[in-house]
Image (cartoon, rainbow, N blue to C red):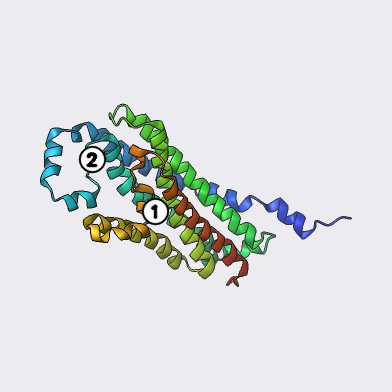
Amino acid sequence: MTHATPQASRTTTFGRVFLRLVVDGWRAMLGWIIGIAAVLGLYLPLYPSIASPQMTELLNNLPTELVEVLGYDDIVTGAGYTQATFFGLLGYVLIVIATTAWGAAFIAGAEETGRLELSLAHAVGRVQYAVESIAALLAKILILALVVYVMIWALNEPSELNLSAVNLLAGTIAWASLGLLSGAAALAVGALMGRRMWAIAAGAGIAVISYVFDAVGNTNKDLQWLYTLSPYHWVYGNNPLAEGFDWPGFAVVWALSAIFIGLTIAGLARRDILG
């Protein structure tokens, strides 16, 4: 009579955490998709009425600092309008809320409800659980990014945005990267502390600070040093929808996300899990 070794048992369970986190949340994911599609469907078709001499004159009469803080300095172009209305504002809020909620729930939320301890007791290693949680977060972000890209591309010609496919890809990746950063921060704090509210605070906090530093930097040239502390500015400083990929900025955001991912794995592997 043969008995399965612990290693073999754990191998057979690989992927179950990932599938549960992705599949069980399909209703919420559908809600996020509908919400994002609604925002895009509402705002992008309005662009032809925005790109007018009257709007240009109105913007010219507003204080320059206010226009730059709002991100409206290039709003009369398709790239500037899409950036200002979706990627830089409403879309940014939506992706941060979604990824922060997922990151906080996957480890810290599971620990607070007792599901994490139950999973670890059934041949799922700590490192495996962390890795599959990270993979689930990435999968969900990729799904939303695909929806955004396809939706904007479908509206590109009818809305007269004149976006290029490559630049739209750059803008979508920039947007998804900021979501990954907030989600990874929430995962890391959740793995280190085991408290969902702290994880939410971490994910939301890095997003808010990032946006505020960019906005404050826009108000005064003496404060533009804040750009160096703003992940929002790292990926959006050179409008990717107009200029394409800003690889150095992307790389810094990905590196910071990788640090949080490393902390997630190390934190969950070493910390005592409370029952």
Give the numbered dot on residue 75.
Answer: 2
Residue 205, percent across and down?
A: 37, 63
Residue 233 place in picture, x, y as percent: 35, 52
State the image coordinates of residue 186 (x, y, percent, origin top left): 46, 61
Q: In this view, does 24 lie above or below 220?
A: above
Q: Please, is residue 264 above or below residue 237 in the view?
A: below
Q: Which residue is drawn at 24% across and 41% down?
A: 74
Where, by quadrant of the figure, is residue 271 drawn? bottom right
Specify whether residue 124 is in view.
yes
On the picture, is 15 further left or further right than 194? right
Precedes in sequence: disc 2 or disc 1? 2
At x 43%, y 43%, the residue is 173
Q: Which residue is drawn at 39% across and 55% down?
A: 231
Secondary structure beneath label 2:
loop
Relative placement, left or right, of 156 versus 101 is left
Residue at the image position 23 percent from the left and 52 percent from the top: 69
Q: Is mark 1 on a helix, strand or loop?
A: helix
Q: Mark 1 points at which residue?
A: 96
Q: Which mark is residue 199?
A: none
State the residue lying farthest toward the top. Answer: 157
Closest to the camera, between mark 2 and mark 1, is 2
Query: Residue 262, located in which quarter of the rendered image?
Result: bottom right
Q: What residue type is labelled 2?
A: Ile
Quarter of the rendering occupied by the C terminus = bottom right
Mark 2 and mark 1: span between their CA atoms? 23 Å
Name the residue type under label 1.
Val
Image spot of residue 155 (x, y percent):
33, 31
Residue 171: quadrant of the picture: top left
